Amino acid sequence: MITEMTREDLACAAEIERDLFPDHPWSEADLCYELEENPYAQFLALKKDGRLIGYADLWIMFDQAQIANIAVAKEFQKMGYGQILMDEMTRRSIAAECENITLEVRVSNSPAIALYEKNGFIKAAVRKGYYDNGEDAWLMIRPIGGLEV
Ligand SMILES: CC(C)(COP(=O)(O)OP(=O)(O)OC[C@H]1O[C@@H](n2cnc3c(N)ncnc32)[C@H](O)[C@@H]1OP(=O)(O)O)[C@@H](O)C(=O)NCCC(=O)NCCS
């Protein structure tokens, strides 16, 4: 069900972006950059019956892993798919022998924060005015050094 993102998936991913983040979606060009140019990105596609229903963008930079994006299409949320994406990113981060997984999340994004806290992330710091609209971000960290795949 989880595969590597392909160029053919990008239009559908951009549509999900616009639906989930109407004020600040990643464009198809942004998504294409992650897929084809970002040397650190592992771009995962989550499919059901051949249809793209979610995706996650994991950056593995030497001993650090960072979740750059995780998204599940609205009609498939709260059905365990976000957790499936999280499990795969965790597995890959441990396999790459990373010490931590980090991420930034809007302080208002309660569903995502709940997902991250359920998976052992802790709020480490506030990044003031991190987003374009001035909203703060939580920097969250999950230590994984020493865990086994
Ligand atoms: C965050 C997101 C990926 C979660 O995906 P999901 O498939 O709905 O999550 P799951 O069904 O796997 O839920 C896993 C856990 O996440 C938390 N969670 C998910 N949705 C939640 C909600 N609406 N309210 C509170 N907690 C929620 C819960 O802890 C849940 O565990 P539980 O079911 O045992 O309570 C999804 O809400 C999403 O795509 N949001 C928009 C995009 C986004 O904000 N991405 C994060 C950017 S930093």
Image (spheres, rainbow, N blue to C red):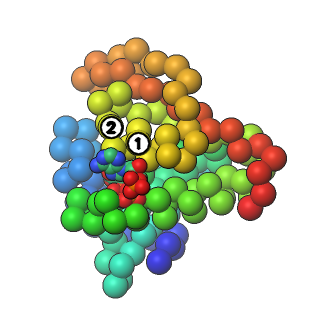
Task: Where is residue 38? Give x, y as percent.
Answer: 55, 49
Residue ID at (51%, 37%): 103
Checking the image for residue 2, the label placed there is: none
Residue ID at (72%, 54%): 94
Q: Is residue 128 above or below residue 34?
A: above
Task: Where is residue 92? Give x, y as percent.
Answer: 66, 59
Packing grade of label 1 (10 A; few <14, some 14-19, many >=20) is few
Left or right of 43? Residue 61 is: right
| Mark 1 → mark 2, Cα distance in angstroms | 6 Å
Residue ID at (58%, 47%): 59
Tag 1's secondary structure? helix
Label 1–label 2 contact, CB within 8 A: yes
Furthest residue in direction bottom, as rendered: 49
Amino acid tagged 1:
Ala
Q: Is residue 6 above or below residue 91?
A: below
Q: Is residue 132 above or below residue 28?
A: above
Say whether mark 2 is within 8 Å of ligand 1. yes
Question: Which residue is identified by label 2?
Answer: 110
Amino acid tagged 2:
Ser
